[in-house]
Image (cartoon, rainbow, N blue to C red):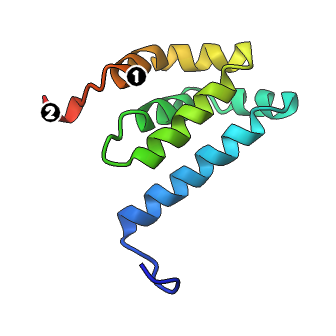
Amino acid sequence: GSAGSTGSPSTVAIRVVGHVLRFLTTACVFPECQKKTAECGAPLFQLICTCLSFTAFPSLMTHALECVCNMALSSELQEGLREAGVVWFLLLLAFHYDPTLD
């Protein structure tokens, strides 16, 4: 759209989530941020994992994948992702499985 348009609410939501994922991707490089991120708990890790399955929004999936990669640098964040089921989401992504087709 044009520079002045705000877009549909769903498009705005996708952009906001993408920005949050990009922020987390960068923040998770720093040890103090890793600790604060781990304190957010399961809902944050589940959201990141869920974003890996949004096949209609490839840029969002890319941001989520980059976030998972940087979070994997910390064993504490790795554990949070593992508990949220990240391995399952990554396997589905690796084999191009689309759960919306079920």
Residue 33, image x and y in percent? 81, 35
Q: Position of residue 23 (x, y in %)?
A: 69, 47
Q: Residue furthest left?
A: 102
Q: Residue at x 43, y 33 (%)?
A: 52
Crowding at dot 2, Cα within 10 Å, few <14 / some 14-19 / many 20+, comes out as few
In this rendering, position of residue 97 left or right of residue 31: left
Give me the C-alpha separation between circle 2 and circle 1: 15 Å
User: Residue at point 54% right, 51% down?
Assistant: 18
Which quarter of the rendering shows the N terminus? bottom left
Q: Amino acid at mark 1?
A: Phe
Q: Amino acid at mark 2?
A: Leu
Compared across the picture, whether 48 is left or right of 33 comes to left
- From the top left corner, tell me how far across and down residue 16 is, in percent: 54, 58
Q: Which x, y percent locates residue 66?
A: 59, 34
Q: Which residue is mark 1?
A: 89
Seen at 68% across and 28% down, the residue is 70
The reply to whether the C-beta atoms of the residues labelled 2 and 1 are less than 8 Å apart is: no
List the residue tagged with mark 2.
101
Asked where in the image residue 10 lies, by quadrant, the reply is: bottom left
Q: Is residue 22 left or right of residue 65?
A: right
